[in-house]
Amino acid sequence: MGADGTAEVVFDIPDFAGTARVMAVAWSKDKVGRANGDVIVRDPVVLTATLPRFLLNGDRAPCISTSTMSKAGQGSTASR
C-alpha cells in the first residue's frame, strides 16, 4: 500500500463479459478502511453476427456483422 493510501491489485478473471464487483478491506493497528467498485470485463475486439432466425432451402439473406473495439476504456462501433 502506498503512503497516500492507494494500492494496485492485479487479478485473473475467467472468460466472462460484463461487470464484476470488486471489494477490498484494509486495516492497520489504529485504522480500518474498505472500498468497492465495478470493473468492466470485455475483450478488446468483439464481433457480433446478426443472422435471420429462419431460412428455407433457396432463401437468400444478408449477414450483418458489428465489430466493437475498445481502447483505454472507450469504445467505438463500426457496422458492415
Image (cartoon, helix red, strand yellow):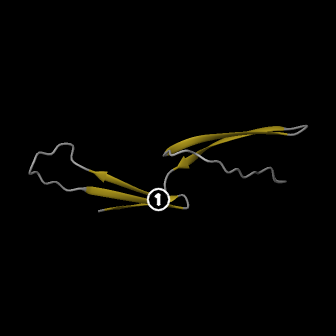
Q: Is residue 70 toward the left or the right of residue 64 in the image?
A: right
Closer to the camera, 52 or 76?
A: 52
Q: Secondary structure at mark 1?
A: strand
Q: Residue furthest right?
A: 29
Determine the image quadrant of residue 29.
top right
Q: In the rendered image, which residue does mark 1 sit on?
A: 75
- Give x and y (percent) for residue 70: 48, 59
Determine the image quadrant of residue 61.
bottom left
Q: Quadrant of the C terminus?
A: bottom left
Q: Is residue 24 toward the left or the right of residue 50 in the image?
A: right
Q: Residue at x 78, y 39 (%)?
A: 33
Q: Residue at x 31, y 53 (%)?
A: 49
Q: Residue at x 53, y 43 (%)?
A: 19
- Give x and y (percent) for residue 15: 51, 46
What residue type is disc 1 on?
Gly
- Give x and y (percent) for residue 4: 81, 53
**Image label count:** 1
**Dot 1: within a 10 Å radius of its alpha carbon, few (fewer than 14), some, or many (20 or more) residues?**
few
- Give x and y (percent) for residue 9: 70, 50
Q: Is residue 20 toward the left or the right of residue 32 in the image?
A: left
